Amino acid sequence: MTSRSPQKVFITGASSGLGLALAARYAAEGATLGLVARRGDLLEAFRARYPALTIAVYLADVRDHAALAAAAQDFIAHVGCPDVVIANAGISAGAVTGSGDLEAFRSIMDVNYLGMVATFEPFIGPMTQIRAGTLVGIASVAGTRGLPGAGAYSASKAAATRYLESLRVELRAAGVAVVTIAPGYIRTPMTDGNSYTMPFLMDADAFARRAVRAIERRVRFTVIPWPMGLVSMLLHVTPRWLYDFAFERAPRKKRAAE
């Protein structure tokens, strides 16, 4: 247990992967939690592990904006405005234009980008009213450049990164912080299906510890683990001709339709 006062934290995509690891990290600090996911059984199992904590669980898909708003309103009504809101819900799959993957493109963008907007929407008013709070978006190093075979995922994470930057500037004068966290390769069910080498692969609990520290410090943008931050910076400045040559034959994620 740290010396910080327990916080109120609202997390989407909390039933597995990064969301579950973040929920566990905050639970270890005694936080009051609001957890959203499509798998209610997993949320209930998590709540049962912490009988001494106040943990509200909400069965909802982030594409259901009305359900998200209702969950947010219920959390605020019962425990107050959260200190931290983490838009973590995300999906990933290979998607290739010209191969009938339009629905995969739509689903990935709806969850990874619009789902983030819908997560924050109900909390902006309450947070700006009290001039406090931190909104956290889980982006990805994959949003730095367009990865072959991952046009949907890279585009969704690039959109999320730019959206979070816009939101950060918009809310600066209102006293609300916006934190962008861009994970590299983290060991989760999402990455378990990758058949290619994943450099600097990190366990989810180690990611969560670093992410919570960054959120506490209100870091504007951070890449976890840090070596992937160096990779991201190099990719960002790589000339297009060199990037194209280097990544033309890069390994590709399995398509959703396969």
Image (spheres, helix red, strand yellow):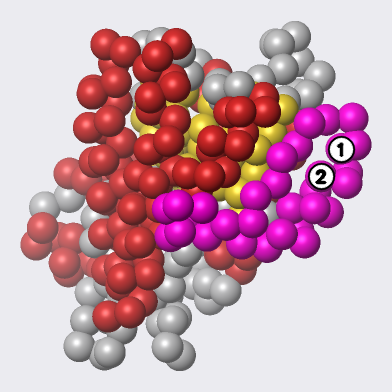
> Hey, which quadrant is residue 71 in on the image?
top right
Q: Is residue 33 above or below residue 141?
A: above
Residue 216 visible from this viewpoint: yes
- On whether residue 42 falls in the magenta region, the answer is yes
Can you identify the residue that label 1 sits on? 50
Can you identify the residue that label 2 sits on? 47
From mark 1 to mark 2, how far is it between C-alphas?
6 Å
Quadrant where the C terminus lies?
Answer: bottom left
> Hey, which quadrant is residue 152 in on the image?
bottom left
- Magenta range is 38-67
Q: What is the x, y in percent for residue 48? A: 88, 46
Is 159 left, or right, of 180 in this rendering?
A: left
Label 1 residue SS: loop
Q: What is the x, y in percent for residue 99? A: 26, 90
Label 2 residue SS: helix
Q: What is the x, y in percent for residue 158? A: 27, 50
> Hey, which quadrant is residue 249 in on the image?
bottom left
Q: Is residue 136 above or below residue 198?
A: above
Q: Mark 2 Cα within 10 Å, few/some/many (few <14, many 20+)?
A: some
Q: Amino acid at mark 1?
A: Tyr
Q: Residue at x 36, y 11 (%)?
A: 175
Q: Residue at x 90, y 36 (%)?
A: 51
Q: Is residue 234 above or below residue 30?
A: below
Is 207 left, or right, of 181 in this rendering?
A: right
